[in-house]
Amino acid sequence: MKKGLLSILAGALLVVGCQNYDDQFDSLEQQINALAAQASAITQVQSDLSALATQVSGLAGQLSAADLASVTSQVDAIKTQIDGLASVGEEVDNLNEEVDEILEALGELLQANAVINQNLKITNEAELDYVESLIGTEADDPTVIINGTFEVNNGSLSTAALAARVNAVVAKVRTVIGQVTITSSATIDASTLGFIDGAANITNGVDISGLATVSGDLSLGHYGDLDLSQLVSVNSLTLSKSVSITSLNIGNLSGTLNTQNYPNALTISLGDIALTGVVTATKATSFTWGYDSDIAANLSITVSGVAKVFANSVPSISAVVTLTNSGDGSEGHFGALKTVATGGSLVNPAKTIAMGAITTVSGTLTVNGPSSVDFPELATQGGAISASNAAIFLAPKLIDNASITTSGTAAITLKSVSSTVNLTASATMEKLTTIAQATSLDLGLLPGLKTANITGGGSASSAIAVTVNASSTVLGTLTVDGVLNTLTIDTAPALKTLATAGEITDFTVSNSATMTTIDFGHTFISGDTAATVTVSGVAELKSLDMSSLTKVKTVNVVNNAALASIVAPSSTVLAEPIAAISVTLNGNKLTGGYTQAVEGAETKPYSQAAILSDDLATFKTFIEAYAAQSDRVSSTSVSATSGVQSITYSMNIDVVTIDATSTATATLQAALVSNTAAQKGLDKSDNTADDATDAAGAGDAASTYGVSTKNELDLVTTE
């Protein structure tokens, strides 16, 4: 019913003049009065009421708010009379419903026609009277759209009554399509105003809490605690009283901010607004900026020393950006920042820096406040990075390509060190961790290191060498992992323990007066040459277990004065037969026994010699495993060689007990030299195949000391 009446109302009002609706209401009133005496007249009243709806609808294009109010008043009167006809039954009820629907339709029509197509001005009482004739101020009157300029100045309307009337009118304005000027000497309620299609100039004291969009330039005279969080879009914003703003929130705003001086603001929240030049907020302890594009123009943000700065939407910087917060508790947050481009620079001395997304520093980055800096995604460097206060510097994806400044005793973590020269604290830094060292690294160039955790990033085709030498005077802890082609530790005066893991081809520890423990945990590099192990001149090392090492081709363990126990590498996971096998053991503190060979005769059996050594027994198994490989080639002599081409060994026991006589001790080499029967063998002739040993005395080369032939190896047994 309502939709039908509204359609009739809208159509009829287009063709009937405003003056005709009074006659129609009079006719309807007469019909209803007659209906009070005779129920049969209800049908005619219905007809007249429908005609009225049709006539009123025709006024849609011509009705003013006042006209429609008059219609509403007359319909109310008719409804009152109909209410008196309750006794006539159902037809009266139907009339009541129909009048209600007309009233509702009129209300909607009034709302739809609430557009004022002219400029409005309220600066005196006469202008106020006129505007009140256009804009209803009752609670049920609609809000309006002004299609024109709108100017309000209540300077001469400051009495309580006049001010209330101004407030009531302005509170009914929801949209202005034109320029807006509101000047307040007393509070003005413009909280309904949500959209201005034009420029606007509004002074302090005007409530604009509903204003969301201004298509033109907006100038505000507001100050104190200014919350404009509902304001989302302007062409530009000027805050003329910025020196008196104590807090500012335009955190959802996009557009241009013309005002950048807030000397008394304690908190500032800006939206997606480009800033350039100098922004001053010297008392601000919190500064939030929602800009989400590249900073392409130089910018300086001056805040209090303890300020927390949040610029978590900025993705890149290609200009010079400087912040000033450097006091205790200061923070700089750049959560989305990925790139400081070539020519760009970021300087933020805050005590805490949150920059977890940064991947590239091609320009310069200066963060000299934090004691700890963490750049988990930083992978590319083309310009200097300064974190001069950082005792911890973490960039696990970065290979240095320019200077990195830290505190003098910093602990630095990088993917790989390309040049120690880039580490400005190289002489004094105390800890280094590499995640995938990609080039050779001399830790002696970092003489202040106390701890090094080096993980190699090599391969079978690389040539990555990690070196420790006498310059590493305070290096006390070294762990290695990953893939390193060569690990060489020479002297290292403070290094007491060494643990390895990962893959290493060539391993050397030499000339150490302090190392007590070598814990092997590494294996070979697949596709590289077979592994080698050298331990030489390690004075305090007492035991060496190489059983975890696989595919080892060279063992050289010599001149380790305290080394009393040694276990050979794996005899089950072997290098390929093309690998030349070499074992040298000499000058250590290995102990064992020697049972001398006893010459035989035609009536007395030859008694073979025996070498009793648990240490050498492990190497016997190791060597024999290689000798048994199917592609090995036998040599011509088992009494003068190992019996297999490309396998050589010289394994001496440093203290042997001869014939179980505890007082008769010597080296294995000396015991063999003194045992003529062993030298001649069963046939009692020198240089024949059955010679148990080829030891001859002073003329023997060191490379033949101890066990060096197949026949001598056969003498080895456990103790």
Image (spheres, helix red, strand yellow):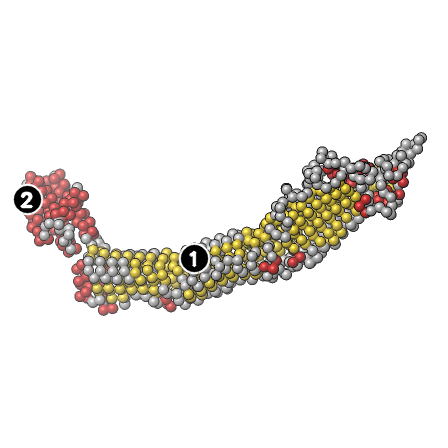
Give the structural element (helix, strand or loop) at label 2.
helix
Q: Position of residue 123 (x, y in %)?
A: 22, 66
Which part of the image, by quadrant, shows the C terminus?
A: top right
Q: Which residue is mark 2?
A: 34
- Residue 294: image tag: 1
Mark before the other along the chain sequence, 1 or 2: 2
Q: Is residue 52 left or right of residue 370?
A: left
Residue 260 is at least partly visible in this image: yes
Q: Position of residue 373 (x, y in %)?
A: 54, 57
Mark 2: give few (<14), some (14-19) or many (20+) Cα within 10 Å.
some
Give the structural element (helix, strand or loop) at label 1.
loop
The residue lying at 12 percent from left, 47 percent from top is: 12
The residue lying at 77 percent from left, 48 percent from top is: 558
Q: Amino acid at mark 2?
A: Ala
Q: Are marks 1 and 2 in contact (CB under 8 Å)?
A: no
Q: Position of residue 45 (x, y in %)?
A: 8, 43
The residue lying at 31 percent from left, 62 percent from top is: 217
- Which mark's residue is nearer the viewer, 1 or 2? 1
Q: Quadrant of residue 428?
A: bottom right
Mark 1: give few (<14), some (14-19) or many (20+) Cα within 10 Å.
some
In the rendered view, tell whether residue 351 sits above or below residue 692.
Answer: below
Q: Camera-side residue: 89 or 473?
A: 473
Q: Amino acid at mark 1?
A: Asp
Q: Is residue 72 left or right of residue 677?
A: left
Q: Position of residue 718 (x, y in %)?
A: 79, 37
In the rendered view, tell whether residue 166 sits above or below residue 714.
Answer: below
Extreme-top residue of the structure: 603
Residue 100 is at least partly visible in this image: no
